[in-house]
Amino acid sequence: MSVALDANILLYAANADDARHEAARRALSELAGGPEVVYLFRPVVMAFLRIATRESVFPQPLSSGEALAMVGDLLAREHVFSPGEDELFWDALQGSAREQGARGGLVTDSHILALMRRHGVRAIVTHDRDFRRFDGIVARDPFARVVVAAVKL
């Protein structure tokens, strides 16, 4: 099984001031520990680097070195991959973008989705509900509470 990682998990893990920080760090630690294959696609990396270093977003933004080190630590693991676009990517992007009439933030989600489909990844660890819109994709939210209903026998 393989899974893609979304930028919001990295951002919550990097932001100690966020209420989701500890849960995100646990999820990231589990993924980093393997053995599940993890895809850290380039649009995700770029979003993380851009947002985590901005003073207007983070109360205590990461330095470029800290943000790069966080990504580098993940990419140094044998089970973490960061493939890019290939010659068939444009067709995959068009299909993903058309699927939901992608505009605004859904354009980036469509980009990630196209990369997932090109590399056979069917699950993404994210807090972004928009990924639930796409057919064939499982959005695993590490912050969702599991509610178990009692069953009478």
Image: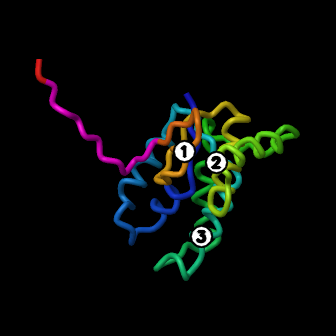
Question: Which quadrant: the C terminus?
Answer: top left
Residue drawn 71% across the image and 50% down it: 111
Between the C-alphas of marks 3 and 1, the distance is 24 Å
Is residue 10 rendered magenta in the image? no
The residue carrying mark 2 is: 100
148 within the magenta span: yes
Magenta stretch: helix, strand or loop mostly: loop
User: Seen in the image, is 34 located left or right of residue 51?
Assistant: left
Residue at the far bottom in the pictured view: 56
Residue for badge 1: 133
Q: Are marks 1 and 2 in contact (CB under 8 Å)?
A: yes
Residue 51: mark: 3
- Farthest right residue in view: 87
Distance in Å between CA atoms under marks 1 and 2: 7 Å
Dot 2 amino acid type:
Gln
Q: Which residues are magenta?
A: 140-151
Q: Answer with mark 1 or mark 2, whichever residue precedes in sequence.
A: 2
Separation of residues labelled 2 and 3 (CA atoms): 25 Å
Q: Secondary structure at mark 3?
A: helix
Give percent across and percent down for residue 123. Answer: 54, 37
- Between 31 and 5, the one nearer to me in the picture: 5
What residue is rendered at 57% in x and 69% in y?
Answer: 52
* Label 1: element kind: helix
Q: Quadrant of residue 114?
A: top right
**Amino acid type, callout 1:** Arg
As drawn, 78 above or below 94: above
Packing grade of label 3 (10 A; few <14, some 14-19, many >=20) is some
